[in-house]
Image: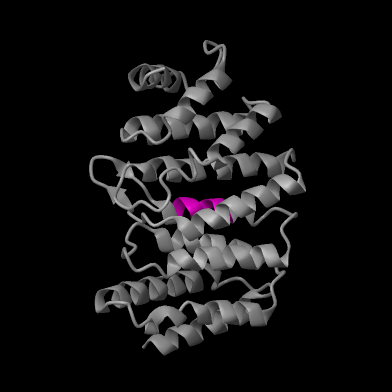
Amino acid sequence: MDALILKQKLQHIQSSNHAIDHEEQPYELALHMMKHIGSTDPVLRDELIYVTFATWIGQGVFSEDQLRHVLQLALDDQHLFYGIGEQGTDSVFTRTFSVLLLPPILNVDREKPFLNEEDIAGIHHRLTTYLECEKDLRGYADEKGWAHAPAHAADAVEDLAQSPYLKQADLLELLHAISLKITESSEVYIHDEDQRIAHAVTTILRRNLLEQKDITAWIDSLHQGDMAVNRSFLETSHRSLNVRLFLQTLYLAIRTEEDEPFPAVRSLVLQALERDK
């Protein structure tokens, strides 16, 4: 199915509030949607494909087997890792809208579990690897719409971190992987990336499985790249700004949290911000 026909079908479905009475095979349509999930048409990609996926997944339109297959597609090399490492190319849209399918799928799993420990481990591995490898950090691309890799990946981290299958070591790996996006220097984050990442970190902390020494080391690590000898002044400035903005946002996100480990984390964040003055 070409992009124009798919767009017309999805517009018709959207006009009927995503009702599927007239759509006999929503799963077959979903497979076509996966083929066009990286479209450079922001209406097709964002407003139609993603919104239809999120709505239908939330409504339970797909069976568990179908949902598992969509998840496998989203995580494969032709979607989450399509063109990985490229910067400034259109491949970013395939990657970032594939990772954005994880939150609604994981939300369904929390409400009615269908993923096992091995499935969650596979998602964890692919997501942390993706965070380590993604280099295109553009927020909004003129005419082509949202790319937003750090924000979309953070949303996935936030949902994955809630899985009871994830233990201390797994959560530390998620923190490390997401810190790579906090400390990036190729872009200054101006599209709420700091808030989405802070929400993910707060969710990880709320599991209360991490030791204070690990949290301290993680916060300290955010500053460790500032002295990199091969980093330009502009890169250092971008990095410092992103780290400071994230820490400020994290502090605001946890300012009223009184359960462990948040009082101690607030103190650590304030100390880190004091060092930035």
Nearer to the camera, 213 or 21: 213
Quadrant, the C terminus: bottom left
Magenta stretch bounds: 151-157
> Please, is residue 196 above or below residue 242 in the view?
above
Quarter-of-image position of residue 236: bottom left
Nearer to the camera, 104 or 229: 229
Nearer to the camera, 151 or 132: 132
Quadrant, the N terminus: top left
Quarter-of-image position of residue 146: top left
Residue 152 within the segment the image draws in magenta? yes
> Please, is residue 208 above or below residue 64 in the view?
below
Residue 60: percent from the left, percent from the top? 64, 28
Label count reads 0
Q: Is residue 106 visible?
A: yes
Residue 33: percent from the left, percent from the top? 46, 27
Q: Would residue 94 be found to the left or right of residue 124 on screen?
A: left
> Please, is residue 1 above or below residue 95 in the view?
above
Quarter-of-image position of residue 229: bottom left
Nearer to the camera, 124 or 241: 124
Residue 167: percent from the left, percent from the top? 73, 62
Residue shown at 30% from the left, 42% from the top: 145
Residue shown at 62% from the left, 65% from the top: 173
Residue 23 within the segment the image draws in magenta? no
Residue shown at 62% from the left, 31% from the top: 69
Q: Is residue 207 visible?
A: no
Q: Residue furthest left?
A: 142
Q: How is the image coloured?
A: one colour
Q: Would residue 49 be found to the left or right of residue 103 on screen?
A: left
Name the magenta segment's main secondary structure.
helix
Residue shown at 43% from the left, 89% from the top: 275
